[in-house]
Amino acid sequence: MTDSIDRRRFLKVLGVTSAGAAAVTACGIGPEPTERLIPYLVQPEDQIPGTATYYATTCRECAAGCGVRVRVREGRAVKLEGNPDSPINRGRLCARGQAALQGLYNPDRISHPLVRNASGTFEAIDWDGALLRLSAKVREAQGKGIVFLTGAEQSTFGDLVDEWMKQVGGRRMSYEAFGFEALRAGNRMAFGTATLPSYDFANAKYVLSFGADFLDTWLSPVEFQNGFSRAHAFDAGRPASMAKFVYVGPRLSLTGMNADEWIAARPGTEGTLALAMAQVIMSQHLARVPADASRLVSVLGAHRPSAVAQAIGIDEATIVRLAREFARSGGGLAVAGGMATQGANGAATVAAVNILNYVVGAVGTLVKFGADLAIGSTNSFAELATLTSDMAAGRVALLFVHGTNPAHSLPGAFQQALDKVAYKVSFSSYLDETAAACDLILPDHHPLEQWGASRPRAGITALQQPVVQPVFDTRPTGDVILKLAGKAGTFEEYFKGKVGPRVQNNADQFWLEKLALGGIYGTAPTRAVRLATDLSAVAPSLEKTSGPAGVEEQTVVVFPHPALHDGRGANKPWLQELPDPVSKIAWHSWVEVHPDTAAKWGLATGDFLLLKSPFGAQKFPTWITPSVRPDVLAVPTGQGHTAYGRYAKDRSANAFELLGAQATAYGGRAFIVSASATKTAEHQRKLATIEGNARDLGMGTTEVLPLARAKALRPGDHPFHFEETPEYAKDAVEWWAERQHEQAEIGNYKGEQPRWGLAIDLSKCTGCSACVTACYAENNIPTVGEELTERRREMAWLRLERYWRVDEHDNVQGAVSQPMLCQQCGNAPCEPVCPVFAAYHTPDGLNGQVYNRCVGTRYCSNNCPYKVRYFNWYNYAERDGKYEAFPEPLSMLLNPDVTVREKGVMEKCTFCVQRIRGAQNQARLENRNVRDGDIVTACQQTCPSEAIVFGDLNDRHSRVFELAGNPRGYHVLAGLNTKPAITYLARVVAQDTTSHG
Amino acid sequence: MVLILALPPAALSGQQAQSASSQSSRYQAPVISDTGALKGPRQPIFFRHDIHAGQDQIPCMYCHYSASISSEPGIPSLQTCIGCHQLIGGTTPAHQAEIKKVRDAWRERKPPEWIRVHALPGFVRFPHMRHIKALGTTACVTCHGDVQKMAQVAQVSTLRMGWCVSCHVKNNVTRDCSVCHY
């Protein structure tokens, strides 16, 4: 050894050799760590390694009760899909449902029971010790006030809690931050029933929403979106038609964005508008009105358009036109909710809209009572306020909390009242604000880990079954309660006893069948309703109780964030990183300010505005948008947690702080407050947004057709302008690509191949962004966090671009949402510039990206005109790395069929190539060809509107081929001659004369 | 003599059960005295493919049951081993010592942690079932070598991409990158 080799290096080399000896000889490819293969002890019958097993269960992320099928690989849940057997969601699933996986494998889950010790911190305790302690507490507290607080829990679990509470002399209460009290009270006022009906959007011919956000947070969004899409998408049949959608509200929510017309009525006047329309319909005999509606004449008499137009802020002619359109459609459906029913006159607004429906005959046809939606069965906010004061007065000795987080949505009052409760027990899986204030935490299983049966609506029992072994040392709360109640058996046995067949001898067969279906599905009979006898309270008061009190005061609307909702989604990075469909802002809250108002106040985007209501104050960064009334400010809920894990804690502002704890007259909560707005001295922040430009700028990215024009289209028409190639370039442009492909027809490129393509119907796409989260889940896309999103380094392969739609007066009427993803161009600009052939064209028409060849020059992304290529700037998969995207156990949800990319590698949409190959493999095993419909991309599968269709463009019988030839079809940036494989079908708008409040 | 029971194969296809009358041409696994001279990683239990697959002619897919239906070939569960070895205790002290390890593992409910021999990097997807479908259920030796003669499994093919591609070219099947890399 003549070369001097220093000791350090020698030892390093020695260390590698000795530790890695086994590894290097074992695999012979490179210094990879030795892998071990650990076999099963006993092979489970239904698992085949390398293939997935699907289990049906129910999503519990909201009260809608959609059925899901969970794809399980080797005992890990890796993807949720909608269950096609469920009549609620019919195989579709929203972003919140997709993100349930991140709740199951959340790194901040409570992994074992915790008890608060003498010094006030939590320490671990074993289950038996915890239950002993709790039994003693229950005995102590009997007679002194025991309350069990749940979320919306119309389920067997809720029944068990009711039974137990009766046994110990306590009571159960249920609380949802958005409890639809106005809907229930308004239904009682108009029809004498405080239950919630089902709404048949699919058969509506005209949809009129008074604030009801039925596409994002109102009642059952996936179901309604699916039905709405059937009605509202352009049907090119004979006759060609579409249902017009008009949205009445002070701001454009996700639902409002999809309207053909936006009526920006003054906040609080929506009910008056409904009655004015009803008045026109009745007085002008525009519909076959039910006989007993004659009783309405007196109420409606005061609501002639001429009398109320000024108060509403809409001109008379528009009111009359709307009434005529609504009645003449022959299938008008009016829904009320959201911002229109969150003021002091919320219930009366609902009653007014009920009357409008009644007058056109929608009640009993499109609005069917008897469904009794579960969300309508919770206690009202007024009842919770009573509980809070009971707690504060020391009348509750023992409080249990399960599946709800009132300390976040009622930050002041409930937090303080909690301190006065002698002993508090939480069953939460996460250390949220309420759990953090409790004395004992007995973490429940995640809904995907446990048995259960819930009744999201009458006639449907949605079944839950465990799809994976419990990840942590948790126990189903049902089991805990049975133990505390001194009953034998598990919750599984209890619920099977309640829900199972009466005759036990075919119980196994029953369960096999029903669990595979995911539920026991029946239809509840429709309950006929009549107009209530006393209609005196129906007319909504126009008193500006919810309006500004002083000159300095602004009307602030607090609305539920579509993904984070009442804050429960904030601990899931997929939902935090999901750009809000309207504002395209991720990871933080904002306040929506109209450009005129911003100009008046000298506000720039990102300036912090301090909103101070009589109840609290919070700062929000400004987002200037034309989609809100100039006299209204809007802030979303969901952020501002003080606990709840690393993704939620200490992030942005909590809009619930601005709201009061007093119930309104109808027992609900006022989400519209007056607040002063002052610009703070705090420095501006850069908004974490993925948005480029809110205007299409005539690029032809989104095409919109008026309904009349769409109806007149014939096959073969080309209604969209595209650049004609100049003569001197014709050869080059039109022949060059063809010549290249001809010359390249060697080897694999020879012969008949599929050409994979997509068709996206913009008439169906609502911008809900379920596809975005589904893509994250399917393709192991890392979440980059707030800092990197601000720096525009988001990794989403599929983004939704939102372009405002303006009328001839430059007023916003709605928006067009366009999913933008790799177009898999036939003449791709990214392919010729890759120096190492990592980006290349596959024989079956995909723009392939080979991760292991990529060296990271990023020339491909530079050349891409659609900007749909994403670079891994950091090692997002690195354990304990700075931008770690999958901290344990979040890495368990990674899809084993897709490579996890390293730093320095470019990635982009692959048309779910793993699913394409999977279907091809399956077809080969079965000795057949791939059929149209075998391959379903993740985005297509989850889309509640069924807007995306995948297939083989070379197969003349495929759906995608037919759609690609549709006259409404066009390519984005077609003039660049990229020959994309994605055909977009233009949005059709039922345009008429427009109005703006 | 090793006791031969009627073995119900889990996924028998393509291979015929050998009858006892062809004993004269039967392969006899040698006695191994120097395990250190064997190629391949040392496994927690000295499982001999030359005895099981060679001498006893157990078909590959009796244990590696999912090779024809899945990307993963499947490593046999301990239940598969115990199926025979609850009765077969071994004839020589060496064999008995190893079989005792199997029984101990079953009793203690701790399956052995085998050292993986054939591993591809994370950016490659190799579908076993496509290859079995194309080449047949006896084609395991094509890539894994003559496992039936191996006392200790060692990797004999490089498993590098060039080796894969040359076989694809020879058999005139696809060489498209996105078939294996996604």
Image (cartoon, rainbow, N blue to C red):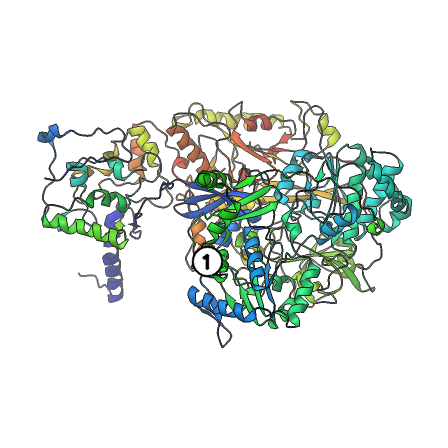
Which is nearer the eye, B47 or A20?
Answer: B47
Residue A980 visible in the current orientation: no
Q: Residue furthest bottom?
A: A119
Q: Which residue is mark 1?
A: A475
Vertical position of residue A901 compared to residue A760: above or below: below
Residue lying at 44% horizontally and 30% vertically, measured from the top left: A843
Query: What is the tally of numbered marks visible in this picture?
Result: 1
On the picture, is B128 further left or further right than A983?
left
Which is nearer the eye, A810 or B137?
Answer: B137
Q: In the image, what residue type sits under mark 1?
A: Arg
Residue B33, horizontal then vertical, whole percent? 9, 48
On the picture, is A189 further left or further right than A373?
right
Which is nearer the eye, B64 or A920?
Answer: B64
Residue B104 visible in the current orientation: yes
Residue lying at 42% horizontally and 39% vertically, measured from the top left: A837
Q: Quadrant of the C terminus of chain B?
A: top left
The chain letter under disc 1 is A
Vertical position of residue A165 compared to residue A756: above or below: below
Q: Quadrant of the N terminus of chain B?
A: top left
